[in-house]
Structure formats: C-alpha cells, structure tokens
Image (spheres, rainbow, N blue to C red):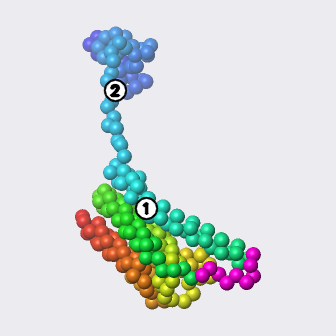
Amino acid sequence: MVQRDELKGQCPPHIWYPPHTCPANSPFVEWGKGAINSSETFPKPEHESVGPSERDIAVADIWPLLPATIGAGATILLLLMANHKQWNNERDDEDFEGFPEPQDTPVGSAVVVIYSIIATAGVSYYVFRVLTSTDGHMLTTFIPVASAISLLLIYFAAAYDLEYHMVPGSFSGKRFGNDIVSELFTFVYFSVTTFATASMGDFSPISDASRILVTLEVLFFIYIFTMGIVFFADP
C-alpha cells in the first residue's frame, strides 16, 4: 500500500521509467503524492539577453570611414566626368589638341592635403577601435581592417591622380596612361607600392603636396604595422 500510494499522480512505470510526474492534463493524474496542481504557476526561465558585442559595435560603427569613402567616390567621379568631356571634345573636333596644361593651384593642393589628413585619421581610428575590441581573434579583425586599408589606398590613388591633373609636373615617370581610367590604375599601383614601401622608382613625387601625400601614406603604413605588432604580441 505504501508503494502504491507513492505512485499516485505518476505515470505507470511501463510508460516512463523511472516514473515521472504526469502532465496536468494527463488522464493518469490522481491527486496525491507527487501529483501536479494545474493551478500552480511555474516561473519562466530567465534568459539573459545577449546584445551585440563590443567588436560588433566597433565594426558596425563605420562613421570614421566616411571621409575616405566620400573623398574617393567624389574624386573618381570628378575625374571620370572630366575624361568624358575631353573625349567628347576630341570626337567633335579633329583638330582638338587637348585641354591646356592646368595652372599650379596651391589652394587646391592644400585642400587635398588637409582632406587626406582627415581621411587617414578616420581610417586609423576605425582600425584602432576594431583591433582593441576583438580580444586577439585574428579572423574577426581581418575583413574589416583589410577593407578599411583598401579603402584608404583607393582614396590615395584618386588623390594622387587629382593632384597630377591640378599641378603639372607633380609626379615624374612614364606611361601614366592615356585616359583617366588608365591613370587611376597607374596610381592604384603607385599607392599600393607606396603603402608597402616597395616602390620601384618608376614614379616619383615632385611637388610639395604630392610629397606630403606620399609621406602621409607611409606614416599610415607605419601605424598599421605597429598596431599589428601590438595586436599579435598581446596574449
């Protein structure tokens, strides 16, 4: 009898073994020892809400990249529009010899240099935030950091090309290109080799503004190199 009383309110052993308390709506429930009172309320398990991590916030917070993005896009668009206008004039006039050489514009060069400093500072700050919020996980930092660096390299290529058109003789070298598109490819090559400090010497900055731009890009490489050492050396 004692064993039978203890099994009241529990499912038969041939269904669940060892015997468990039946659900409240089960026909096997008998009010007794071990029965479930359907009127009782059970507290819901508290699940800790997991929000975005610090790394996710740093990666998604892309406002420091806006100066480089806007600058590169606007410069490339301006150069392409100028190239399209020149191509139309050459097509309409067979005797067209091209636009006259642009005059030296120190104000324009100063604007390019100042804006380049702002763009470089923004990308540097973004890289710093991403590297300092990932707890040493390399895979979670590679894509955002590589994307930010590539963006700045493209910006510098566009800035070099713009300086090349604003200031005659700002760069020395051969085979810059016959149009804006080929020039952009040339200056992308120059930007990448400058950043990697592996310049072959086929192109060189001559004007003060172009030298400042090259120096700024090399300083950015030193910053990235130093941050990489600190990031990987930190256990």
Rendered residue at 36%/75% (across/down): 216
Q: Secondary structure at mark 2?
A: loop
Q: CA distance from mark 1 to mark 2?
A: 49 Å
x, y percentage for residue 112? 43, 71
The reply, left or right, for residue 39 in relation to residue 101 is left
Task: Name the one closer to the observer, 43 or 123.
Answer: 123
Magenta span: chief secondary structure: loop
Q: Give the image quarter of residue 125.
A: bottom left
The reply, left or right, for residue 44 in relation to residue 174 is left
Disc 2 residue type? Lys
**Residue 90 drawn above or below residue 39:** below
Residue 140 visible (yes or no): no
Rendered residue at 43%/15% (across/down): 25
Q: Quadrant of the N terminus?
A: top left
Mark sitting on residue 44 = 2
x, y percentage for residue 32? 31, 11
Mark sitting on residue 43 = none
The mark lying in front, picked from 1 and 2, is: 1
Task: Name the one closer to the observer, 98 or 210.
Answer: 98
In the rendered image, which residue does mark 1 sit on? 67
Rendered residue at 43%/83% (across/down): 207
Residue 38 visible (yes or no): yes
x, y percentage for residue 10? 36, 18
Disc 1 residue type? Pro
**Residue stretch rendered in magenta on the structure:** 92-100
x, y percentage for residue 58? 36, 54
Give the mark, 1 or 2, whose residue is nearer the N terminus: 2
Q: Secondary structure at mark 1?
A: helix
Assess whether residue 97 is covered by the magenta stretch.
yes
Task: Name the one closer to the observer, 210 or 153.
Answer: 210
Assess whether residue 190 is covered by the magenta stretch.
no
